[in-house]
Image (cartoon, grey):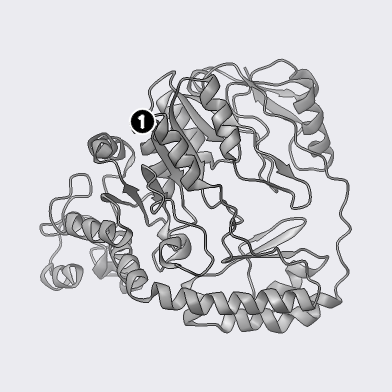
Amino acid sequence: MRLKSLARRDRFPFHMPGHKGKFPSLFAGFDPTELPGLDNLHCPEGVLDRIQRRVAGIYRAEKTYFLVNGSSVGIMAAIMALVKPGDHIIVPRSCHKSVLAGLIHSGAMPIWIEQEFCLQRNHWLPPTVEQVKGILASFPVRAALFTSPDYFGLVPPIRALAELCHAANIPVIVDEAHGAHLAFGDNLGLPESAVAAKCDIIVQSPHKTLPALTQAAWMHLHDLQLAEPLQQTLNLFHTTSPSYMLLASLEYAGAYAKAQGPKLLRRLSLLVRLLEQRGKQFNLGVWPRGSQRDWTKFLLQNRPGLPELLIGKGIFPEMVESDKILFMLTMADALDPSGVAALLRVFPEVAKLPESIVGDRVLPPPLPVQVCTPREIWFQKGEKVPLDRALGRIVRQVIAPYPPGIMIAAPGQQLSREQLEYLALLHRRRMVPEWVEVV
């Protein structure tokens, strides 16, 4: 309403943005700058403050911050607020690359969780309580970061991990970018949200699973003692020209999810059940539902010609990997189930395609030894050398061949023969170049 009112009154704009509302195809009438009445994202005291409080109430958090640079800005700000140069922070090796950016900015030393790799699923399994216990017994940790759920919907025992860390007086950051919908799925078999598990800082991307515009995200806080340092670090990373269309979409997403989320997720659960049952009838290699996986991430085994078949039917999946295809289902698919119906119709044709021949799968090697912080190596001059000349050198880049996106090495780690042999194998499969940037 505030944007509509301003659009009517602001008849002769002599301010940014440059389109000045004269190009309706850009939705220009609702794309203002920080004008009187619209508040300031860097120091919200008016309408933005009220909306953020409203969303915090919906999620039962102590405080919520709106983010217009995606979850990445929240992850970086959270790391910067909790750790300083040289501090130890627990991090899963399958983390998002924004975590590496936060490590570089903060100067913290990551203590990597060596997660188990599942050859059958060709995917990392979530961290366990025992793995984290081992780290806490060996290092003076200042903070911990976990991902829940991951890109394919797998979740760690987030409540148990939070309780373990809190018992040691360690704050917990959760990258819950893919889990903004979890709070509205009570009794539907969805994993517990990190907000309900009382983790300290939870970063979510409503644009991934709720009706919000791309880049629109938010961050929830349970420990109000962290409010001021978080606002300060956010102000370092946030744009000084926030999009009010993004902010308005966050207000809408919160209100819509509260009003319609439980009903639509119940409907979506039935639709996904139907996909799972029909997929099993046709022997399509459906990933099973479980208490430690978000069932809104529907996965099918890939087959030769399957991506082309889907696109030919107008079905565009979220991700295609050599062995699996990911379909993200949201409240929008419950509101309009035509996409689910189209996918069901194509199942008989999928069943006629030849099954993939799974080649030899090799376990990724352990992470290299972290000899210095990512920040220390970042400010050194690197050089690109062939893989056969990189033994013992310290990596300056993130090496995470995609697909499947597995991190083999991070800045500040020393390459051993084991990692180089694995990289050479991936190079032969044309997944990585024949060089690596090292110091």
Q: Quadrant of residue 127?
A: top right
Left or right: 301 in relation to 233: right
Residue at 77% over, 57% down: 323
Residue 206's spot in the image, x, y percent? 41, 60
Residue at 85% over, 73% down: 353
Against 70, is 136 above or below?
above
Q: Quadrant of residue 326?
A: bottom right
Residue at 42% over, 49% down: 71
Q: Which residue is mark 1?
A: 82
- For the image shown, how many numbered marks are present on the structure? 1
The N terminus - image quarter: bottom left
Residues 386 and 148: in front is 148
Residue 212's spot in the image, x, y percent? 39, 65
Residues 116 and 312: in front is 116
Against 157, is 422 above or below?
above
The C terminus - image quarter: top right
Q: Residues within 10 Å of mark 1 (few under 14, many from 20)?
A: many
Residues 209 and 116: in front is 116
Residue 177's spot in the image, x, y percent? 46, 52
Against 127, is 290 above or below?
below
Amino acid type of the residue that numbered disc 1 sits on in the rendered structure: Leu
Residue 16's spot in the image, x, y percent? 22, 55
**Secondary element type, mark 1:** helix
